[in-house]
Image (cartoon, grey):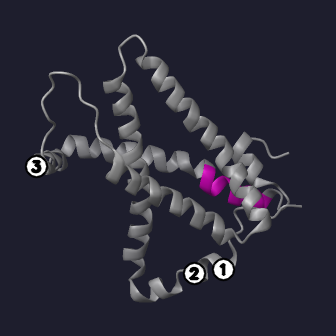
Amino acid sequence: MAKSFVLCGDHAIRGLTPVRSFLPLVVLATILLVLPPLGVALVKPCVVGTTARASKENVRSIGYSIYYTLVNIGGAIGPWLAGLINEHLPTAIVFRMAAVSVFLMFFVVLVFFKEPQRSGETNTASIAETLRNFVKVLRNPKFMAFLLIFSGYWIVYWQEFISLPLYVHDYINPATNTDRMLSTGRSL
């Protein structure tokens, strides 16, 4: 029987002991919660924006379809691959692999991405102008309330992938293959 991906064990926790003794827990938790979305937050807009700018109107929807199909394939294969790796290697390796992947996405986009321009189009805003616009958005209470509500939705949604496998393993059946459950929605 394959060991479950949700069983992290002490090894994964002990790996952060030196960092945890150096940083307060709130700071470490904030860093760990903010850094992973940065990789994804840079990659997705680049792909979607490039699709919008570099394709003609009549084929743009095909570009989006291809992108989201690949996202869904990755979403199905990811938990399965993590479970497969977890069968042969310590659980901490799975988390390290995911962290390295996001880290690489972040820097590959920062270093290599160049936004395509349409003919006759002027350059985009400078970094200073972008930061001013960002501050303007942060000062908009209605928009910030919307972001807070929308973030709450995603927090609840992601519990399907975080809390549900733990619940199934701990309270329903410890032998459940939670990796397969996350990949397929079934726990056979």
Which one is in front, 176 or 146?
Answer: 176
The residue that disc 1 covers is: 11
Q: Is residue 38 above or below residue 90?
A: above
Mark 3 touching mark 2, by CB under 8 A?
no
Residue at the farthest right position: 1
How far is mark 2 from mark 1, CA to CA? 6 Å
Instruction: Tell me which label, 3 or 2, sits earlier in the chain.
Output: 2
Q: Position of residue 4 (x, y in %)?
A: 77, 62
> Could you tell me the amino acid type at mark 1?
His
Which one is in front, 134 or 156?
Answer: 134
Task: Say what secondary structure mark 1 lies in.
Answer: helix
> Could you tell me the amino acid type at mark 2?
Gly
Left-right relation of 76 to 67: right
Left-right relation of 13 to 53: right
Q: Position of residue 169 (x, y in %)?
A: 77, 60
Residue at image point 57% right, 81% down: 15
The residue that disc 2 covers is: 15
Task: Say what secondary structure mark 3 lies in.
Answer: helix
> Could you tell me the amino acid type at mark 3?
Arg
Q: Position of residue 103 (x, y in %)?
A: 45, 60
- Label ID, residue 155: none
- Label ID, residue 132: 3
Q: Position of residue 109 (x, y in %)?
A: 37, 49
What is the quadrant of the N terminus in the image? bottom right
Residue at image point 36% right, 39% down: 46
Residue at image point 74% right, 57% down: 83
Looking at the rendering, the stretch of residues picked out in magenta corresponds to 161-171
Quarter of the image for residue 36 reads: bottom left
Residue 170 showing in the rendered view: no
Instruction: Tell me which label, 3 or 1, sits earlier in the chain.
Output: 1
Mark 2 touching mark 1, by CB under 8 A?
yes
How far is mark 3 from mark 2, CA to CA? 39 Å
